[in-house]
Image: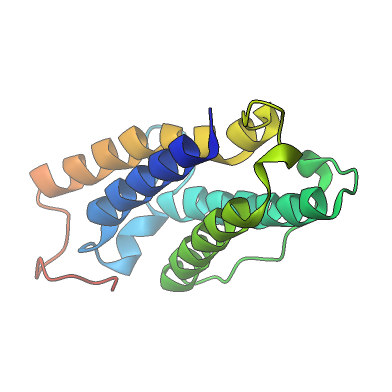
């Protein structure tokens, strides 16, 4: 996958996630995604941490320093869902901006992105979309999406 494909795929996934959750009340995000699954809040906290670690890895790649993206620390997430979701969106945007500033030659001779970049952030992001869409669809179809239907997350 080349950089432009990655950026497009990540952008589409983010927009789909925003559409799923934008009008849901905060208390719904503590609900699990499915039987025995983590909460939506925990999912976005994980995606936020993954974005943060990936940004750090891209910074090291830019500098030509060796790293292991899986062992990089990330900061603690805020307890409120709105803050966690904001952190995720900021991390996502920062990751894409960092990706754009790295010369293509740092990735490979043909511009292909390294597998760790796909497996650490893009693939978990893309995998979360149908799960959150299904979860939000179930909430809406069962009348548990909230009393107003007005956007909650801006």
Q: Is residue 94 left or right of residue 142?
A: right
Please name the residue shown 37% across and 57% down the image: 29
- Numbered circles on residues, count: 0
Residue 153 versus residue 56: which sits nearer the camera? 56
Residue 35 versus residue 65: which sits nearer the camera? 65
> Residue 142 sits in which quadrant?
top left
Decide if residue 37 is in sight here. no
Residue 129 versus residue 40: which sits nearer the camera? 129
Please name the residue shown 47% across and 40% down the image: 4
Colour pattern: rainbow
Residue found farthest to the right: 66
Q: Is residue 40 left or right of residue 119?
A: left
Please name the residue shown 48% across and 73% down the image: 83
Q: Quadrant of the C terminus?
A: bottom left
Residue 109 rendering spot, x and y as whole percentages: 71, 27
Residue 3 rendering spot, x and y as whole percentages: 53, 39
Decide if residue 28 is in sight here. yes
Please name the residue shown 87% across and 44% down the image: 67
Quick check: 25 above or below 37?
Answer: below
Residue 70 versus residue 11: which sits nearer the camera? 11
Quick check: 129 above or below 78?
Answer: above
Residue 11 rendering spot, x and y as whole percentages: 38, 48
């Amino acid at each position: 996958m080349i950089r432009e494909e990655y950026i497009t795929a990540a952008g589409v996934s983010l927009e789909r996630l925003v559409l799923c959750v934008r009008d849901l009340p905060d208390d719904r995000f503590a609900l699990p995604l499915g039987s025995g699954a983590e909460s939506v809040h925990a999912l976005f906290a994980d995606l936020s941490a993954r974005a943060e670690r990936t940004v750090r890895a891209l910074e090291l790649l830019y500098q030509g320093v060796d790293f292991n993206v899986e062992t990089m620390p990330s900061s603690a997430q805020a307890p409120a869902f709105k803050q966690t979701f904001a952190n995720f969106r900021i991390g996502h945007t920062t990751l894409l901006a960092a990706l754009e500033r790295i010369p293509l030659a740092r990735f490979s001779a043909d511009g292909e992105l390294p597998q760790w970049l796909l497996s650490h952030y893009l693939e978990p992001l893309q995998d979360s979309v149908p799960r959150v869409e299904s979860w939000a669809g179930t909430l809406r179809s069962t009348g548990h999406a909230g009393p107003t239907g007005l956007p909650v997350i801006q």
